[in-house]
Amino acid sequence: MAEKILMKGNEALAEAAIMAGCRHYFGYPITPQTEVAAYMAKRMPKIGGTFLQAESEIAAINMVIGAAAAGKRAMTSSSSPGISLKSEGISYMAGCDLPGLIVNVQRGGPGLGGIQPSQSDYFQATRGGGHGDYHLLVLAPSSVQEMADLVFKGFELSEKYRIPCMLLADGTMGQMMEPVSLPERTPETVSKPWALTGTNGQRKPNIINSLALAPHELEAWNQVRFQRYATVQEQEQMSESYLMEDAEICVVAFGIAARVSQNAVDTARAMGIRAGMIRPITLWPFPEKALKAAAEHCKAFVSVELNMGQMIEDVRLSIECKKPVSLCCRTGGMIPTPEEVVQAIVNVHQGGKQA
Amino acid sequence: MTPKRMTLFAGHYGSGKTNIAVNYALYLAASGRRVALGDLDIVNPYYRAKDSERELQAAGVRLIASAYANSNVDVPALPQEMYALTEDRSTFAVMDIGGDDRGALALGRYIPAIVEENDYDFLFVFNRSRPLTRDADSAMGVLREIEDACGLRFTGIVHNTNLGRETTPDTVLSALGAVRELTQLSGLPLVFTAARSDIAPLLPDQLGEIFPITLQKTIW
């Protein structure tokens, strides 16, 4: 195990990307993810990589498309308003079946919103975000260590399935400092026979494109893509369970909300309430298997979010509305306190208030 | 430690300046001194001196910070009250300066008054657990960049190697060689080693004076 160092979430994800073999970073500054670009600007020139501050978010995502089309591991990062700008390019990536990593260190919205942490881009991330029928792989870290670990995972899954991956963090994850271990590892790579690497006159040219001239052809592309999505939904759901074995109340929370909620679960247990927590790590595919299993023995669910209630829809869908699901949320850059989460647990335990 | 009228903490991004500055201000106040803490951080959007506003207020420390600190306004502004730090010589001033050379730029405008009064310590905070200052050479690079950006020479080193909540005495001790080398390279004295208050009593004498600190609180 590598010696632990103290890193900001934004720095850890940047260093992890470099260790994962990413040598092409295209960005544009926006709080609270600016340290990613700052770190890449310092490190990339030293290792022969490319750091490029684009003229806009739109330009940056299109540079990612170019590098990914050439078969390179490429990434960009931004925060909420910047991700909206990138969404057209992300849709093109999905349409071209290009892998790549897009980091969203979320801040409050909508509009210009604010610079404090938020999870209000859940819908945007998990439903596609741009136009057209598509999904992104969406990974949600809840510690600085996981910011790094999920960068490796994100690149690997993205290349395996040729689906762009979004690391959906929030301002606290990006800004907080924690010890992290970054052991040397050989990144898993796959062969990319589709990449635009030059034919040398040896093969037919590859074409990377999201435009189909015939509608039946576009339909077929979409259908093939959705078969891959079905495989991902079957095989790649990730979540972490905390005190769920005998739980009667299941808290569902990701990212920073999960850290606050874990303290609340401990407090509820001390009060004699059998509470537990499922922390989704993949938001798409949503860990519906774990939720469904919990619905067998839990009498109620509490979705804890830094938004007005977005993931709660996936919780309800996963358990097919078999049990009541209530919402505990703060938004606009505010974070639910452990006391607020405890109160929500107590309320559903008493069969009281529901959202 | 005999405190100068002004104590300035600067260093690499994430070296622990804010935690040390807050603790140092509280320490000065606990000995009955009038104290003001200036938050000169124009780099960080979160995790600022303002997070400790209540403790500082309770201890009678005047916090001078941007009205925009911890707000949604992403503007690197400093309030005019900041001049009280240099003008009001009846109060001990502690300055928390933003990270790296970029953060230190904000200090520039106060330097003529600081130099004229000439009753200050300008301390470089060193944390060997940070990835870009893993040894004395790289720390020395940051130290010179900061001096060049703000136009003031450091007067001492504060050693603050830590892993946050996971810090052990070994974490602190592992940096001993690098700290010695940094004092040699820079020609600056080690003023104190900061350590979490539960670890401070376990540290050996070789680390010089130990300054126990309490970390700013979080809800997770």
Image (cartoon, helix red, strand yellow):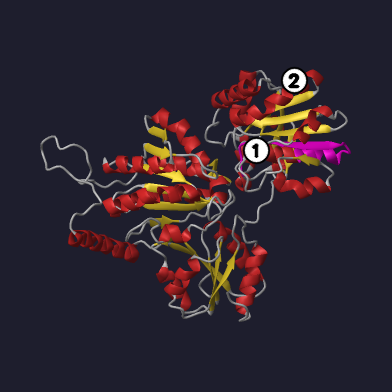
Q: How far across and down, in percent of the image, does residue A306 sit?
A: 56, 60
Instruction: Work out which quarter of the rendered image holds the C terminus of chain A and state it.
Output: bottom right
User: Horizontal and vertical percent for residue B175?
Assistant: 60, 32
User: Looking at the image, which residue is at 47% across and 45% down?
Assistant: A78
Q: What stretch is highlighted in magenta?
A: B23-45
Say left or right for A288 vs A163: right
A80 and A267: which is toward the camera: A80
Task: Assign a secondary structure to mark 2.
Answer: helix
Residue B161, image x, y percentages: 62, 36
Residue A163 seen in this snapshot: yes
The percent position of residue B202, horizontal first and vertical second, equals 70, 41
* Image quadrant where residue A336 sits: bottom right
Say if B126 sits above or below B50 in the image: above
For disc 2, the neighbor class at 10 Å (few under 14, some 14 to 19, many from 20) is: few
Residue that mark 1 sits on: B16
Q: In the drawing, does residue A24 fall left or right of residue B46?
A: left
Please name the amino acid that badge 1 sits on: Gly
Judging depth in this view, the residue of A236 and B62 nearest the camera is B62
Give the quarter of the image for residue B112.
top right
Looking at the picture, does residue B13 appear above or below residue A134? Answer: above
- Separation of disc 2 and disc 1 at Cα? 26 Å
The answer to whether A190 is drawn above or below residue A312 in the figure is above
Q: Name the residue under label 2.
A: B112
Question: Tag 1, which chain?
Answer: B
Asked whether residue A186 appears in the rendered view, the answer is no
From the viewer's perspective, is residue B9 above or below residue A223? above
Q: How many marks?
A: 2
Disc 2 residue type (three-letter): Pro
Which of the two labelled residues, at mark 2 and mark 1, occupies the earlier sequence position?
Answer: 1
Chain letter of the residue carrying label 2: B
